[in-house]
Amino acid sequence: MVVAERKPIKEILAMMAEYKKILLVGCKGCVTVCCAGGTKEVGILASALRIAKKKEGKEFEVIERTLERQCDPEYIEQVASIVENDGIEAILSMACSVGPQYLAKRFNVPVYPALNTTFIGGALEHGVWAEFCQACGNCVIHHFGGICPVSRCSKSLFNGPCGGSAGGKCEINPEVDCAWHLIYERMKALGKLDDMAKVFPIKDWSTSRDGGPRKVVREDMKL
Amino acid sequence: MKAGSKLEKILTSGQFAVTGELGPPRGADVEVIKKKAEHLRGMVDSINVTDNQTSVVRMCSMAVCKLLLEMGLEPNLQMTCRDRNRIAIQSDLLGAYALGIKNVLCLSGDHNKFGDHPQAKNVFDIDSIQLIQTVKQMRDDGKLLSGQECEGVPKFFIGAAANPFGDPFDFRPIRLAKKVEAGVDFIQTQCIYNMEKFREYMKRVVDMGLAEKCYILAGITPLKSLGMARYMAKFVPGLDVPDYYLKRLAGVEKKKQAEEGIKIAIEQIQEVREIEGVAGIHLMAIEWEHKVPEIIKAAGLYPRPEVN
Ligand code: SF4
Ligand code: SF4
């Protein structure tokens, strides 16, 4: 899933400084799962904003909604009547950064992101998420025991581990696992260490962001 | 002869090689470079010029290599993959060769998180082993990665680093084998303090036949003080400084620690010379270039062989 975390309240308050009435929109997709922008978090942020604005002695109204998804025009449409008829001055989105962009495309009011979209990842334990993919557009993890060197090695090495790998940890931080140590252990367990002795060729990054903004077109699904 | 550098000539003639290292300044001062380089003159066969080491911005390695050439010294261009993509790498290699640089050391590079610009975007388009392949393809096939023929082929003597003390230990000789497969000519190792572990590493490397396929230069860094030794033991990932060296330095008064450090370095040089498969040393006297003559002479490595 896409993992995100909420921006600091101070930053959000600064974004909202000039507004008296806003729409705060959450999303029931990934950001609900990673506890950053679901119904619950929308409620918490709305209260925090109301309290802060009240302290400043400012008039402020927040309308709360949480959509099925924000990366889909169909669901965005569900807030159209509120945005267009209720005097909404700004929209604050709690979806991953796709959401605010869809909202901005649809509505002629300023849209703000309440979250920082951090990575594609998963939970390690309760309250801890980690990065697992950088969307390089050409998955090669089967060569590396199912561990992604692009996102999980700090230097995206294809022929690691580098000389800084120590005690299973990455040179950049003893809190970060060395992906290549994990790859080594995994390949050993799979009896595939011989594969690790082969030089992995230079990667074609044109399928990654380096090839420009990407698009997936499925002719079979076009209407 | 692949490149015909002095380093290559010394190594291929079976003589024990000595390389040194020069860290460029954090500014545009040429005098600093000249001063450091003069200490190394006649003491080492080739001088590595670091490439923004520890990700701290310094004068570019290629420019300093050119300054060394003008001084009549042989440079070894260190090149990392941290700050350049394959376009810049190949372009720099062509330029470096045009300037007369014949040795290149292929590195992945320290992560930018360590340096003075942790906010920087890093590159890592290719890795160190793929960089070796790139330089080799340019040299041996006369072709760029795109397949484009080089108008003028850069003939480099290709080097790389190896850390026998990185984890997992069992993989380290295999990683060296990958560098050999990629086409490396010589290897400079990380600073060696744990001699026992290095011996074990070299034994495996020799058993795998790797020492016949590349020249291995053992990395030596004299310890300047107990403080430096402690710092290296604790904070440099992938470096192994055994306790007995810390104790030994702690055992002498502070004024004499530098002297003791030099003694240790000289002993280490003697020890690595006895190890099968070691073709030379790489002396990294970090900000201590003026001590190099003393060390080289005391280790019996002076005068350096003449080649033409
Ligand atoms: S190889 Fe590419 S697609 Fe596969 S997990 Fe890594 S970054 Fe994602
Ligand atoms: S220590 Fe491991 S994860 Fe970190 S950069 Fe080196 S190989 Fe990659």
Image (spheres, rainbow, N blue to C red):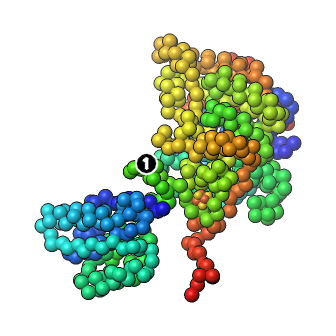
Near-viewer residue (B246 or A162)? A162
Near-viewer residue (A192 or B224)? A192
**The disc labelled 1 sits on which kind of residue?**
Glu
Label 1 sits on a secondary structure element that is: strand
Residue B20 in the figure: left or right of residue A127: right
Q: Position of residue B226 (x, y in %)?
A: 50, 21
Is the residue B3 above or below the residue B39 in the image?
Answer: below
Mark 1, residue position: A125
Is the residue B126 above or below the residue A26 in the image?
Answer: above
Find ligand 1 in the image and state its quadrant.
bottom right
* Residue beneath the point at 63% across and 82% down: A219
Q: Residue furthest left?
A: A57
Q: Position of residue B126 (x, y in %)?
A: 66, 54
* Residue beneath the point at 66% across and 22% down: B195
Looking at the rendering, in which quadrant would you find the C terminus of chain B? top right
Query: Is residue B247 something one can see in this rendering?
Result: yes
| Residue B275 in which image quadrant | top right
Is the residue A197 above or below the residue B212 in the image?
Answer: below
Disc count in the image? 1
Name the chain letter of the residue that bears numbered label 1. A
